[in-house]
């Protein structure tokens, strides 16, 4: 039988694999927009609503679903969520029109809303309190690998044999993870009675609302362009079979950005955040001015991917430091506003695409990410401080063995 340490390592690895599948499911349509658009006879701008609807489900339902399922055993709930991803991807694979595809993505968005409320807490409870940060980083690395490998490989597969094959694979993989979860990850109980989110209290804390609002603006700019990156680079002369490698380059540099953020965020939180924001904004400016050239369009994805790979972890850490006594509530607010940015970016990006064409997307993105950079630069005292505040942990984390015995 595996030791508790082995079980924790296996558990974190499987949670990271689950995060990989979650982000891959969320972002796969980005690389397959041209193929899905042609097959379902829907414009690419309208098809961007598949990303919008998905993200808005997360933004709207993350907090209520988390409260509704707070007392459910964690492993059983996680397995149900992975099955939900399978069902969503099967429906998407079989879709014969836009309404069915939209329904599949709405279901996936509901699953996604709850998934990211469950997994970080599960990871924290698998390890001793002193290793919670590292455990959370492992899980988020699974999402970064999805950008580096899942989305580009799914794009390459969909380009080669059809986009339905990619969703078929995404429907199968969660079943494999579930089988491993049942053998290798310990069951944990849900929350005790009275453990409810205090969202209003978190919002009132200095800096929290500003961080959440700034996050939304940055994500609006980023996803207005990223949602339509496939047609954008195609316009610059990148062939359909090269879009996958371009997305791989973006994701691989993003993975490097995630690791870099993990290494530096505790020592230089403000400097790393401003640098990442500056690189994202600068990349958008370059694409706005020179993005019609193939070489520039491809090369600009390197600093863009590197910087954006770091941003989610940096912004998440910033909001947690602003609300050390209410980490779950602050995280719920952060997740909701983050996904407002994703869905809103896809929606507004589609409008920009219809009105100003592909060339208008990086201009719009540069303005919004630049606004986020300005706010982060100015709001030094409460929202984006130069040094991490030394605060006590809100609540101790129970060990895996203790939690498992209580559930059993």
Image (spheres, grey):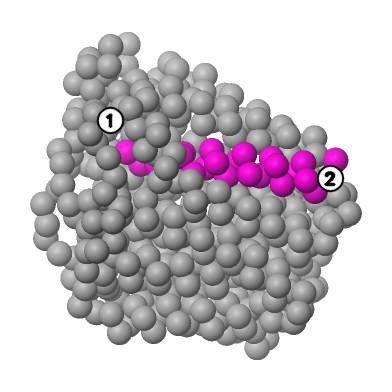
Q: Which mark is residue 97?
A: 2
Q: What stretch is highlighted in magenta?
A: 96-121
Task: Decide if residue 319 is on the left or right side of residue 394.
Answer: right
Task: Decide if residue 35 is on the left or right side of residue 13.
Answer: right
3D distance between C-alphas at marks 1 and 2: 41 Å
Q: What element carries label 2?
A: loop
Image position, residue 13 (x, y; %): 41, 34
Q: Residues within 10 Å of mark 2 (few under 14, many from 20)?
A: some
Quarter of the figure with residue 106: top right
Asked if one can make out residue 256 in the rendered structure from this viewpoint, the answer is no
Q: Residue at x 49, y 25 (%)?
A: 79
Q: Residues within 10 Å of mark 1 (few under 14, many from 20)?
A: some
Image position, residue 343 (x, y; %): 58, 60
Q: Residue 161: say if magenta.
A: no
Number of numbered discs visible in the structure rendering: 2
Q: Where is 66 relative to 225, above or below?
A: above
Q: Of marks 1 and 2, which one's residue comes earlier in the chain?
A: 2
Q: Residue at x 65, y 88 (%)?
A: 289
Q: What element carries label 1?
A: loop
Asked if one can make out residue 221 in the rendered structure from this viewpoint, the answer is yes
Q: Residue 119: say if magenta.
A: yes
Image position, residue 212 (x, y; %): 37, 65
Please state, as top left, top right, bottom left or bottom right, where the N terminus lies in the image.
top left
Q: Which mark is residue 369?
A: none
Q: Which residue is drawn at 42% across and 42% down?
A: 64
Image position, residue 256 (x, y; %): 45, 59
What is the magenta segment's predominant secondary structure? helix
Residue assigned mark 1: 191
Q: Where is 376 relative to 396, above or below?
A: below
Task: Pick whichever, 3 or 143, lies toward us.
Answer: 143
Please state, as top left, top right, bottom left or bottom right, where the C terminus lies in the image.
top left
Q: Residue at x 23, y 56 (%)?
A: 201
């Amino acid at each position: 039988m595996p030791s508790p340490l082995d079980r924790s390592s296996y558990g974190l690895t499987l949670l990271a694999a689950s995060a990989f599948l979650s982000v891959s499911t969320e972002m796969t349509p980005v690389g397959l927009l041209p193929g899905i658009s042609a097959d379902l006879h829907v414009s690419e701008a309208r098809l961007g609503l598949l990303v919008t609807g998905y993200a808005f489900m997360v933004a709207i339902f993350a907090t209520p679903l988390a409260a509704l399922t707070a007392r459910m055993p964690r492993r059983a709930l996680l397995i149900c969520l992975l099955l939900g991803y399978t069902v969503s991807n099967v429906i998407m694979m079989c879709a014969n029109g836009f309404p069915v595809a939209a329904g599949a993505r709405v279901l996936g968005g509901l699953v996604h809303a709850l998934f990211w409320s469950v997994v970080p807490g599960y990871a924290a409870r698998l390890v001793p309190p002193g290793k919670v940060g590292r455990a959370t980083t492992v899980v988020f690395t699974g999402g970064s690998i999805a950008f580096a490998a899942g989305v580009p490989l799914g794009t390459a597969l969909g380009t080669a044999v059809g986009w339905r094959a990619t969703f078929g694979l995404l429907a199968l993989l969660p079943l494999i993870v579930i089988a491993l979860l049942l053998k290798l990850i310990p069951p944990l109980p849900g929350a005790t009675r009275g453990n409810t989110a205090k969202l209003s209290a978190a919002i009132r804390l200095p800096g929290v609302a500003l961080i959440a609002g700034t996050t939304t603006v940055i994500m609006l700019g980023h996803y207005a362009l990223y949602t339509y990156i496939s047609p954008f680079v195609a316009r610059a002369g990148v062939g359909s079979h090269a879009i996958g490698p371009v997305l791989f380059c973006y994701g691989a540099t993003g993975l490097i950005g995630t690791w870099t953020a993990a290494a530096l965020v505790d020592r230089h939180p403000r400097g790393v955040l401003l640098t990442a924001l500056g690189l994202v904004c600068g990349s958008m400016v370059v694409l706005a001015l020179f993005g019609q050239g193939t070489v520039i369009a491809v090369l600009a994805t390197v600093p863009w991917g590197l910087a954006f790979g770091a941003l989610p972890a940096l912004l998440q850490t910033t909001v947690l430091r602003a609300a050390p006594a209410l980490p779950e509530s602050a995280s719920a607010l952060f997740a909701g506003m983050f996904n407002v940015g994703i869905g809103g970016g896809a929606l507004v990006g589609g409008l920009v695409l219809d009105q100003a064409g592909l060339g208008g997307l990086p201009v719009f993105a540069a303005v919004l990410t630049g606004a986020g950079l300005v706010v982060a630069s100015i709001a030094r005292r409460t929202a984006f401080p130069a040094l991490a505040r030394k605060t006590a942990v809100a609540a101790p984390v129970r060990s895996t063995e203790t939690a498992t015995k209580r559930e059993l």
